Structure formats: C-alpha cells, structure tokens
Amino acid sequence: VLASIIRVTSILIVNAPLEKAAIFVLATGLLLAEKQDLGEFGFSLMNFKRQILFALIFSIFIPGTYLVILGSILKLFADAFFSFSIKVFIIVLPFYLVVGLGEEGLFRAYIERQAVQSIGYRKGILWASLLFGIWHIYWHIYPLSILSMIIHVLFAFLFGLIFGMIYEKTNSVLVVTLIHACWDAMVSSIYIPMLNPSAEYIITGTTFFLFFSITILITILVTQRIEPLIKIGPQQAV
C-alpha cells in the first residue's frame, strides 16, 4: 500500500515512478522482520559467475528475440525498420537497474516466493504475475486510458510469468534484475518510424503475440533443462 501511494503520487506529479528504492527496502525489510534468511529468497552472491552468465544469456535472448521479430514484421507490413541507440541504452541502464532491483525484490523475492511456498509453483507464479500486472495500471490513471491500462497490465503479467519462472529456477534476484533492466533499457533505446494506425495495430499485435509465444515456450524448456546446473539456493546471504 505504501509503495502504491508513492507510485501514484509521483506519477501524477512528475510523470515518473519514484518508489523503486522504497519497495526494495520494503521487501528486504519485511523478510528481515520475519527473521527470514535472505539467501533463501535469492539475495545472494553465491555462484556469482553462474548468475551473471545466466543473466547475460537471457538478457540477450529476450530483447534479441523481440528485435528480430519486430524488424521482420516492420519490413513485411510497412517496408520499414527501427533504429537502436547504444548511447541511450548505456545512459538509461543504471536507472533501470534500480527499477529492476526494486520490482524484482518485491514481486519475485517476497510476494512470489511466499505464494509458491503457500499455494504451489504454478499458482504462486500466476498470483505474483497478476499483481505485477496490476502494479502497472497506475501509469494510465492520468490521463485516463482504459485500453492502455488493459494492454499494459497484460504485457506486465506475461513478463511476470517469464521473470517468475526464471527466478524460481535460479533462486537469484540478481539474474531477474539484470534481465528486467536490459529489457527496459532496450525499449527506451529503440525508435520506430511513424505508421498509420491500422498498420501500427497489426504490427504491434503480431509482434507481441509471436514474441510472448516464443519467449514463454523457450523459457519453460530452457529453465527445465538447465535447472540442475544453475540452481543457486537456498544459501547464506551476503
């Protein structure tokens, strides 16, 4: 509730979410207050190289898949192509690392892990992903846009499923934080040329349908296959 109040207020005033540090402190503070071992919830640098390697693989795979699909659909339907700014990516990445750490700390390490322990793996991930989706509804309260709310909530929910599966298989907040940050930074670094409304709807819908279908399927297959190699915890926190 506190994080939501800060988020809504900051979006209304400065059109930017400023609650990231607050929700990270909230998540870790709750775990400490409950006398939990932070390592069991993925706050650990154990097997650091494997965490970084796995994060890099998915940080390239997820945005890369999206860019390949987007480029192909743009070329097919509009004979156009997007541009990507490495400079912008590098500039915004530190900010999105803070975003990723805050949101993954709360929604994956605290909410999802507790839900998985209480109601099971699938239901726990679904519940945390649903809350993660609803969390993004605040972006569109002013000016009010119901359609934008629905779309944003759906996209965030699907990403929650992807991040949730990766988190549960790796038991690493670091891994999902880096993946989350790279995705957000990539989105901020691409420019798509102006399209007519009908073409924009077709391109956007087709791109995201293919992207989420492929990404979720491959995430399921990959995490199942390499789980014995990358399972990190539970271990002692650092």
Image (cartoon, rainbow, N blue to C red):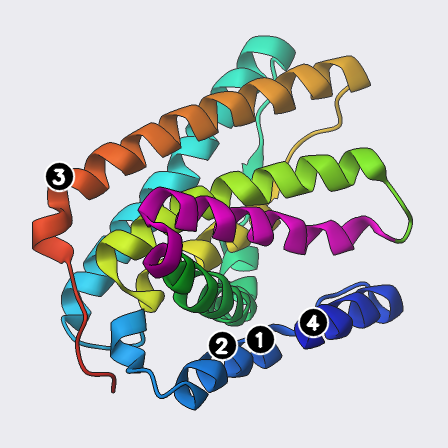
Instruction: Kindly report the distance in space between the C-alpha atoms of the residues bearing marks 2 and 4.
Output: 12 Å
**Residue 142 horizontal side relative to residue 171, left or right:** right
**Residue located 58% across and 38% down the image:** 155
Q: Earlier in the sequence, mark 1 or mark 3?
A: 1
Question: Mark 4 highlights which residue?
Answer: 1
The answer to whether the residue labelled 1 contacts the one labelled 3, judged by CB atoms less than 8 Å apart, is no
Quick one: SS at disc 1? helix
Asked if marks 1 and 2 touch (Cβ < 8 Å), the reply is yes
Q: Secondary structure at mark 2?
A: helix
* Residue that mark 2 sits on: 27
Indicate which label's residue lies in the foreground, 2 or 3: 2
Compute the Cα span from label 1 to label 2: 6 Å
Query: Which segment did they paint magenta?
Result: 116-141
Q: Position of residue 234 (x, y in %)?
A: 19, 71
**Disc 3 residue crowd, few under 14, some 14–19, many 20+, Cα 10 Å:** few
**What's the residue type where badge 4 is placed?**
Val
